[in-house]
Amino acid sequence: MSDVRLPRFIQPGGAQTYPQPLDLRDCHLFSFVLATDGAALGRICNTYLNGPAQGQVMYVPAASCAMLIVAMIGRISCTNLSPEQQFWLPETDIAFWVPVFKGKMEGGVFIAEALQWFLPYVFVDNTWAVASGREIYGYPKAMSSFTLPPHDDPDHFLVNTLTVESFGPESKATWQRLFEITRTSPPGGLFKRTFRSVVETGEALLKAAIAERMLPIPGLGMIGELYDLVVHGTMLMVFLKQFRDATIGTDACYQAVVEAPARVTAFREAGEIAADYDVTIQSYASHPIVDDLGLRGSVDPGTGAWRGSVESAWHVNFDFQVLNATGTWPR
């Protein structure tokens, strides 16, 4: 990392980006696990992470699955502002999360050094979240609107955003329904099993990963990352941060892979939801979610909409912080 002192950021009036770290409280997170094609996940790792990292680091899919995560956050604030500048706002964040391993090749064998999360699609409900997420870390956040259920009765989630059905000179971008999550069975109480601590939850996730043979040969860094996940509730997210060039619009004037940790600061409850769910994703050229992730399911021949069943659903209620980036490539 360079020792050159960077210029101070000039904060304009009316700006919609504010400095990290970020403090997020009263988060109700719902996670819906979807089966995917591992080869498709490998392609997006190569496109969005390995290519831009220019060989300095390598990412591979950790499993043939993705998580569709709904985070209903009651209060977000900046921890790096003076008292007279502080404020807070709520945010809902709905995103597809892909588990990936960061590592290196040694003697033709991939050695995993870290378990991380890559978010290729992110939808949020306020413009400040869009601007700050994109410009600071590289979250590919898109302005959207949602229909959301109460925390204690998660029966239906709906996402609307600006879409293009098919590209062409006369194609108009319109605000449309993109995808929805629907409960398909009567709830048998909210949870079929519950966890009351970060350690208990982390241990359950680690056991599930081992049972599904998700873990490759671990390096020392990987062992440390798993310890931080299980004991401290700390995980790493990885993003492609980039900005279009002002002279040549198809080029990037800045492009880098950025890693940032998220750390649990308060834990209230977690559990596996006692219900079945389906996910339906509409077909738009502007949002090739199904192809990008290789989602396993069926396509309606009439509408082109994809539908798939959720393998398991989870709920977590906690507070956390998104901290300063820990790595940027190339460097």
Image (cartoon, rainbow, N blue to C red):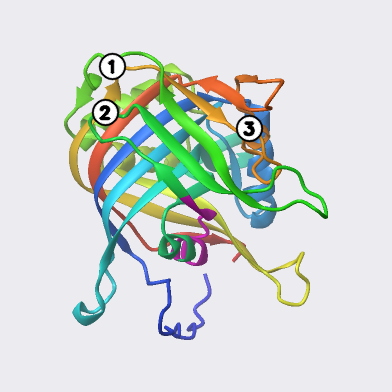
- Mark 1 lies on residue: 187
Give the crowd class for mark 3: few <14, some 14-19, many >=20 residues within 10 Å.
some
Q: Amino acid at mark 2?
A: Asp
Q: Residue 142 lies in magenta, yes or no?
A: yes
Residue 33 percent across, percent down from the top left? 45, 26
Could you say which disc has been placed on residue 236 in the image? none
Please state which of residues 304 and 94 is positioned toward the viewer in this rendering: 304
Q: Residue at x 22, y 34 (%)?
A: 199
**Going by the image, does 121 lie left or right of 124?**
right
Give the crowd class for mark 1: few <14, some 14-19, many >=20 residues within 10 Å.
some
Discs 1, 2 touching: Cβ within 8 Å: yes
Of labels 1 and 3, the one closer to you: 1
Q: Residue at x 80, y 53 (%)?
A: 170
Secondary structure beneath dot 2 equals loop
- Mark 3 lies on residue: 290
Residue 18 percent across, percent down from the top left? 38, 72
**Going by the image, does 297 lie left or right of 314?**
right
Give the quarter of the figure containing the C terminus. bottom right
Per the rendered image, the range of residues in magenta is 132-144
Q: Considering only order in the chain, which callout, 2 or 3, is on the residue closer to the N terminus?
A: 2
Q: Amino acid at mark 3?
A: Val
Q: CA distance from mark 1 to mark 3?
A: 28 Å
Residue 92 percent across, percent down from the top left? 37, 49
Q: CA distance from mark 3 to mark 2?
A: 27 Å
Could you say which disc has been placed on residue 153 in the image? 2
